[in-house]
Image: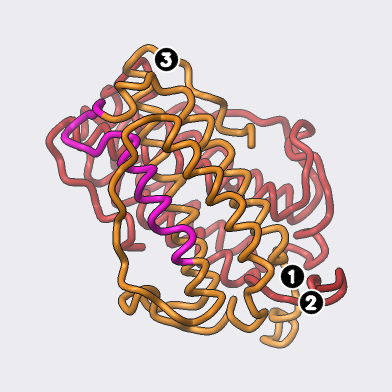
Chain colours: A red, B orange
Amino acid sequence: MTATQEMSITVITPEVLLEHWQGHRRLTRRMIEAFPEDKLFTYSIGGMRPFAQLVQEFLSMSVPTLHGVATGKWENYQESPVPTTKKELLDRWDEDTQEINRLWPTIPPHRFQEVDKAFGQWEGPGYWILFYIIDNEIHHRGQGYVYLRSLGIEPPPFWDR
Amino acid sequence: MTATQEMSITVITPEVLLEHWQGHRRLTRRMIEAFPEDKLFTYSIGGMRPFAQLVQEFLSMSVPTLHGVATGKWENYQESPVPTTKKELLDRWDEDTQEINRLWPTIPPHRFQEVDKAFGQWEGPGYWILFYIIDNEIHHRGQGYVYLRSLGIEPPPFWDR
């Protein structure tokens, strides 16, 4: 297969990638809901961060990353303080869902391939930056599955988005 | 943005998706190596499967899925027995790495979009089937990170592929 043929093959469209991400985000939301209120903010295994803190990482990365990919303008990466109630965390989650849907169609097509330095630090093409944050969410959410199981709680099924 | 414009935007090429997957597979290989031999096959939290069993699931899914996406022919999904040593598990992993690289370029371009029923059971487009197995590996590998941390072992960094 030549390079030109290869480039013309569509594996996924931007629309599909957005839906893929929002599907994962719907599952993460169900995970937040599955945690007992106190355990969400305190429960930990092996010195790892409680699930609420991981969720705050997702929130701190998602919209700022999307904004950077869309505009080429990056702020310094900063983690906001973790909300103190499940309701507040879910409200922040739902606000981000809307903001992601709003920002996504503003990504100029060439930005998926263009190499940029996310937050002035991590260099790669736009698709790579976006996959990094999606994969990071899947990765840490998997950690949350162990927290729930060790608490005797059945987590939501992984395949249900 | 019209549907036609949307379809013409390349988010990732097949080549990029292969490298994305193999990058994740390299990290999973480092995770297998990081486990003490006995803990790899026995250690569990909350009644979840030991890491070797999760790795066997990845092995049982990967090449058969790729074969199905490439050819449209599906066998029944079957899990092979878990190897009994770390060396055997790593050898199986490395064989799969080669086989994935060999099969990947045989996927006909239209198969990434074509809807099929994986293993006669799970229906969706080719890209969706492929992302499912990659995401499943990230998800369960995240579980392995908790196992290692709770054993006092530093896991390989998530960003290093």
Q: Residue B10 carries which label?
A: 1
Does B54 appear in magenta? yes
> To which chain does the residue with label 2 belong?
A
Which quarter shows the C terminus of chain B? top right
Of badges 3 and 1, the one in the foreground is 3
Q: Do the residues labelled 2 and 1 touch (CB within 8 Å)?
A: yes
Amino acid at dot 1: Thr
Sort mark 2 into few (<14), some (14-19) or many (20+) by Cα contacts within 10 Å.
some
Does A136 appear in magenta? no
> To which chain does the residue with label 1 belong?
B
> To which chain does the residue with label 3 belong?
B
Disc 2 from disc 3: Cα separation: 44 Å
Q: Are marks 2 and 3 in contact (CB under 8 Å)?
A: no
Q: Which of B6 and B81 is in front in this view?
A: B81
Q: What is the quadrant of residue A60 in the picture?
A: top right
Q: Residue B147 carries which label?
A: none
Residue indicated by mark 2: A8
Q: Where is residue A23 in the image (x, y as percent from the top left)?
A: 43, 62
Residue indicated by mark 3: B153
Amino acid at dot 2: Ser
Amino acid at dot 3: Ile
Give the vertical position of A20 relative to B52 (above or below): below
Indicate left or right for A60 with B88 as reference.
right
Q: Do the residues labelled 3 and 1 touch (CB within 8 Å)?
A: no
Give the vertical position of A142 relative to B87 (above or below): below
State which region is magenta. B42-65
Q: Which residue is drawn at 41% across and 45% down?
A: B139
